[in-house]
Image (cartoon, helix red, strand yellow):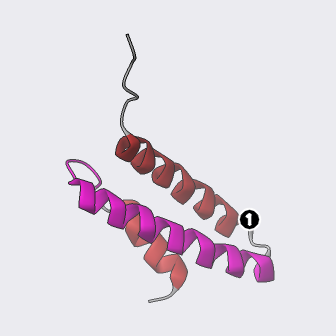
Amino acid sequence: MNLTERALEFESRKKSSLSTSDRVKFSREAKELILGLNEEYKINKDPATMDLMKRLTAIKQKIEKRLKGRPISEV
């Protein structure tokens, strides 16, 4: 299974009702895939690879936003 296939499979995976440890795993896996695709993009300059990286980055940002939680408001 090559990197693009792994990224597409990751993108289609269910991401709702995850535990905190699952979110951490998803975030790390997304980072690994994005960095791998970036190396591939440097060689190929394929616009489809760039679009896939952008979609994975959006997913990763959503997961990390949920991990950080809401800031505690000070009174």
Query: Above or below — where is 22 with respect to 64?
Result: below
Q: Position of residue 48 (x, y in %)?
A: 67, 66
Q: Toward the viewer: 26 or 51?
A: 26
Residue 8 falls left or right of residue 55: left
Q: Position of residue 38 (x, y in %)?
A: 68, 73
Q: Helix, strand or loop at disc 1?
A: helix
Q: Position of residue 72 (x, y in %)?
A: 36, 25
Identify the residue at horizontal 62%, vertical 55% (top origin): 54
Q: Which residue is mark 1?
A: 47
Query: Above or below — where is 31 with respect to 39?
Result: above
- Which residues, given as a range, are shown in magenta? 15-44
Q: Residues within 10 Å of mark 1 (few under 14, many from 20)?
A: few
Residue 14 falls left or right of residue 3: left
Residue furthest front in the image? 75
Identify the residue at horizontal 19%, vertical 48% (top origin): 17
Residue 35 occupies which quadrant of the picture? bottom right
Query: Above or below — where is 36 with respect to 13?
Result: below
Badge 1 amino acid: Pro
Q: Say which quadrant the N terminus sits in.
A: bottom left
Residue 14 falls left or right of residue 7: left
Q: Is residue 38 covered in magenta? A: yes
Q: Toward the viewer: 61 or 14?
A: 61
Identify the residue at horizontal 40%, vertical 28% (top origin): 71
Residue furthest bottom in the image? 1
Residue 13 falls left or right of residue 7: left
Residue 27 occupies which quadrant of the picture? bottom left
Which secondary structure is most common in the magenta stretch?
helix
Q: Say which quadrant the C terminus sits in.
A: top left
Identify the residue at horizontal 80%, vertical 73% (top origin): 45
